[in-house]
Image: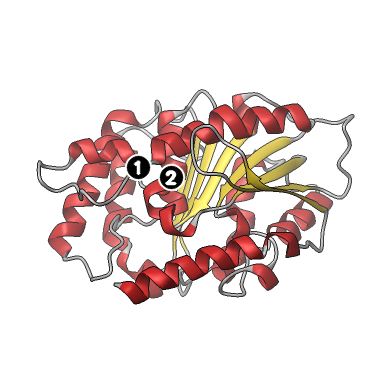
Amino acid sequence: MKIRTLFVLFSFLLCQWSVAQQTVSSGKLVQYPLFKSAIVAPRDVFVWLPSDYSPENRYDVIYMHDGQMLFDAASTWNKVEWGVDEVLGELLEEEKIRPCIVVGIANIAQSRYEDYFPQKALKYLPNGNIPENIHFNADNYLRFLVEEVKPFIDKEYSTNKGVEHTFVMGSSMGGLISLYAICEYPEIFGGAACLSTHLTMIISSTQPTKEQTDLWFSAFESYLTDHLPKANSRLIYMDRGDATLDAFYPPYQDKLDKLMKEKGWTKPMWISKVFPGAAHIETDWMKRLEYPVKFLIGTER
């Protein structure tokens, strides 16, 4: 346990140390180290602007989690990245998406699970199944995003402020919090993109049993049954691979897809895709990033 704690702490320190080193190959990256908050612990915020950004124009905004992993592999803990600047820069140049900026909110390594786990789903767990040693904090994290980060971005940058121009995106636990965000704040977010969503729910130092995983997913499924936005009123993109950690997701993603259909969700407002051979890693999310981005803000929508 001590070794695991030290590893988490080291990852956190590495992420913080590398903030000043972030660079992009397309557009401009503005960094706000340890963005102050009255709601959650300070964390870094990154704002990516397209190369032709102008205050005279208006831009859609995509808010992305795990912000330190989006732009510069040289500064990430595993030396890979999403390639957001490259992918979106190319899509903008080809006029395949509407003008946009990306706001990346960095995670804090030792509290990432607590910040991203859909907190209200815990109410659907049977008594005695909620860990007492975990301080779940997703509701405050979303308040931070909605009440502090978004107002700051709308003030400092030339944004389209409306719900139809505001989106949220993430992978793994970031996929969970993105889906949770559109359930909790459908008046703020017009769409959510959830890649390799961690529908097994549990992160533990030991492998959880299938019974535990089924129980926790069932709680989230019940939450979604009660709290999903009205069918086809928002945009929801989901996907998964089938390698590494993604190999555990098919039965749970299938159940979630079934729920979405039962609730009345249909194309083109909802889509669930499978990418054979794709693993649970930023390089594979980069390879398919164009799909969720075009789904949310494509010029052909």
Please indicate whether residue 265 sits to the left or right of residue 148 in the image: left
Question: Where 230 falls versus 16 (above or below)?
Answer: above
Q: Position of residue 197 (x, y in %)?
A: 41, 55
| Local crowd size for mark 1, using a 10 Å CA cut-off: few (<14), some (14–19), many (≥20) | many
Residue at which label 1 appears: 118
Amino acid on which disc 2 is placed: Ile
Residue at which label 2 appears: 177
Q: Position of residue 231 (x, y in %)?
A: 40, 29
Indicate the secondary structure of the residue bearing disc 1. Answer: loop
Could you tell me how far apart the alpha carbons at marks 1 and 2 are, in whole angstroms? 6 Å
Please indicate whether residue 150 sits to the left or right of residue 267 in the image: right
- Which residue is outermost to the left? 127
Q: How many marks?
A: 2
Q: Quadrant of residue 70?
A: bottom right
Amino acid on which disc 1 is placed: Pro
Q: Quadrant of residue 110?
A: bottom left
Please indicate whether residue 93 sits to the left or right of residue 62 in the image: right
Question: Where 279 falls versus 258 (above or below)?
Answer: below
Residue at image coords 24%, 40%: 122
